[in-house]
Amino acid sequence: MINFSLKPVFLAPLAGFSDLPLRSVVKRFGCDVTVSEMISANALVYESSDKTLEMLKKSPEETPYIVQIAGSDAQIIKKAVEIINRFEGIDGIDLNCGCPVPKVVKQSAGSALLKDIDSLKKIIETIKKTSNKKMLSVKMRLGFDEKIPEILALAAQDAGADYIAFHGRTRVGGYSAKVDYEAIARAKSAVKIPLIANGDISEKNAAQVFELTNCDGIMIGRACIGKPWIFHEIKSGKSVSSELKREIILAHFDAMLSHYGAHGVAIFRKHLHQYSKGIDGASSFRDEINRIENAQIMRDKIENFFKI
């Protein structure tokens, strides 16, 4: 499903941002593999709300499409995977072992699993045995408070992961510590399965990250917020024109309306705040759009503001 010889570019799971509309847009403009927002195994099993199930849906453009789950109890994760098994069009399941958010860590999930390798392996093995999807991956950090990339990479490989993604910081490093690409390279050299590099990757350093880490692909996260054309720039090596930027922003807005209905207008404001950064008149533009509820008026404002 994923041709690692072509050095694919992934969209990282981004809470509150990498929903179906954004994923469908980046897929059209250079992203090779999309991953859902992180979905709680507990929520999937015990709540089974429309909102949680909605997060499993994908757009027709999304192939391959990976669903990321988080949890710490192997039996609950097994039940969550059984629910995911019922959905067609999902190509793989990714286990989150990198989320640094305290409420996730307190549940012994996310990056907390990096402190309990036996539990980590058991969960990966459980997903492997239960899943009917083609691929199983693990997204992790270099460690919880110390860097142990080789140990973690081998544990994931031995437990049955088909590929791994490494964010180049520890949990303690949060999102502010310097990314250690050399440590990602150590993880890569320790295993035979493909490895994806993640952490502070942009169109400016993507080629260098491939060289430094010897990775099989890269994963773009926060760098694509307000800049989904980054995938196109990485692939083409060229800057995107103002015309294409406006086309992408409008495509994103239309996808939001298609997915969320009229409510998409309000949800899209946070994206427009990011899109308008650094542009003359951004402050007054944000002030205006914060009060707009009508989709056509919002579309007109977008077209006029991003004509530059």
Image (cartoon, rainbow, N blue to C red):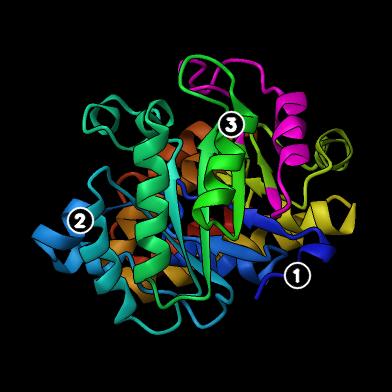
Horizontal and vertical percent for residue 55?
Answer: 32, 64
Residue where numbered disc 2 is placed: 75
On the question of residue 276 being in view, the answer is: no
Residues in magenta? Answer: 167-195
Q: Considering the numbered disc 1 on the image, is that residue within a helix, a strand or a loop? A: loop
At x 22%, y 46%, the residue is 73
The stretch drawn in magenta includes residue 254: no
Q: Is residue 189 left or right of residue 80?
A: right
The stretch drawn in magenta includes residue 193: yes
Task: Answer with the quarter of the image where residue 162 lies.
Answer: bottom right
Q: Nearer the viewer, mark 3 or mark 1?
A: 3
At x 58%, y 27%, the residue is 142
Distance from label 2 to label 3 (Cα)? 25 Å
Instruction: Report crowding for label 2: few under 14, some 14 to 19, many 20 or more residues within 10 A (C-alpha).
Output: some
Find residue 3 and name its label.
Answer: 1
Q: Considering the numbered disc 3 on the image, is that residue within a helix, a strand or a loop? A: helix
Q: Is residue 105 above or below residue 194?
A: above
At x 75%, y 30%, the residue is 186
Q: Is residue 274 above or below residue 123?
A: above
In this rendered view, identify the residue nearer to me: 74 or 242: 74
At x 74%, y 40%, the residue is 188
Horizontal and vertical percent for residue 74?
Answer: 26, 51
Label 3 vs 1, first from the N-terminus: 1
Q: Nearer the viewer, mark 1 or mark 2?
A: 2
In this rendered view, identify the residue nearer to me: 275 or 59: 59
Q: Are marks 3 and 1 in contact (CB under 8 Å)?
A: no
Residue where numbered disc 3 is placed: 151
- Amino acid on which the number 2 mark rests in the picture: Gln
Instruction: Report crowding for label 1: few under 14, some 14 to 19, many 20 or more residues within 10 A (C-alpha).
Output: few
